[in-house]
Amino acid sequence: MAEWQPSGEPHIGIIGCGSIGSLLAAHLTLAGRSVSVVDSWFRNVEEIRGHGVEIQAPDEAVRARIDAHNIDEVQNIARPLDVLLLAVKAYESANALALMAPLIQDDTIVVPVQNGMAEDWIANVLPRGRLVGCAVHVPAELTAPGRVRRYLPRGRRTFSLGAVGGDSIAPAQYLAELIQPAGDTEFAADLPAVKWAKLAVNTMTNAPAGLTGWTTNRLWSDPRSEPLITRAAGETLAVAEASGVQPALVFGRIRPELFHRAVSDHGAEAELSAAMAEMAAERTGASESRPSLLQDVDRGRRTEVSYLNGFVVRQGATRGVPTPVNAALHDLVAEIDRGRLKKAPGNMDKLRALVG
């Protein structure tokens, strides 16, 4: 494939106008970027067409009118895409790529703006284009059609972008500048290290929130949950290391080895608990943030637990790393997906009974 070069003013397509897709669309449009969005929720598209997207953040409120299309109107987007941001659920990615395929060119930058480790398998189904990896750090929630609550300001770390495999770093560096208006975006020279550190956060936050209904800060600071969920993070980090990746600092500040030592060292356990409580206390703008998996449970949607905790379990089995907490979290949330279990604070006791 020829060396990638940017050309002119890019046309950005976003498929999936939930919290992250809407956030990106609004801020990029307000920055003068050419943006078209596609979404499967008719009411959401109609609200965006009529009144735009409104973003409520701790330090600002913005509204943007955006070129919005239903999924049966993709043919109305006349201009091919220079950038495609996949802001759908992980399990919707293959269908989303197929839907947008007519607009993807050989040099289109395609970015999965999702939780989990989607890049490897998306590379296998991408019809054409150049894949760039992404870690999403900003907590947000679609509270109503066309309405997003952003729990941390744009000045906090929002996205990390990096090359996939041995691909050129130029598209990722270019895109990090392009989407900077949506929030602090970094080019990550070692994206797998950042992605695994973020996956550790996902595995100890999303599934436990969906099980209990608890907010992020409560999970991180409550003595009934914190020792258990940090074990899930430690398992995730151990699988990363067995895969040949040295994870980055978790939350950008906590050393991965502290999660390992906390299992058997009371001093390390106390240090980790204090660090988690400090993280919760600092997130004043996100004190009531609800992880995306809890949002899915509340809406009766299929969760992404198979792409988060389930991924860790599968990778751990391949590499001989035990992952009992992630396995229990996966199985309990799978029961919620099947309608056999309801979210409840008491599910934390079920988790504890399963893993000891």
Image (cartoon, rainbow, N blue to C red):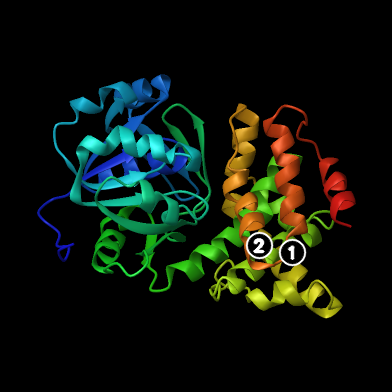
| Quadrant, the N terminus | bottom left
Up-down relation of residue 120 to residue 93 (above or below): below
Q: Which residue is mark 1?
A: 322
Judging depth in this view, the residue of 350 and 276 nearest the camera is 350
| Residue 146 as seen in the image, left or right of residue 262 | left
Task: Identify the residue at horizontal 68%, vertical 46% (top origin).
Answer: 207
Which SS class for mark 2?
Answer: helix
Up-down relation of residue 158 to residue 140 (above or below): below
Q: Position of residue 70 (x, y in %)?
A: 32, 24
| Residue 66 as seen in the image, left or right of residue 47 | left
Let me know if residue 16 appears in the view.
no
Disc 2 to disc 1, C-alpha distance:
6 Å
Q: Position of residue 183 (x, y in %)?
A: 38, 56
| Residue 74 as seen in the image, left or right of residue 244 | left
Q: Position of residue 25 (x, y in %)?
A: 32, 41
Discs 2, 1 touching: Cβ within 8 Å:
yes
Q: Position of residue 173 (x, y in %)?
A: 28, 66
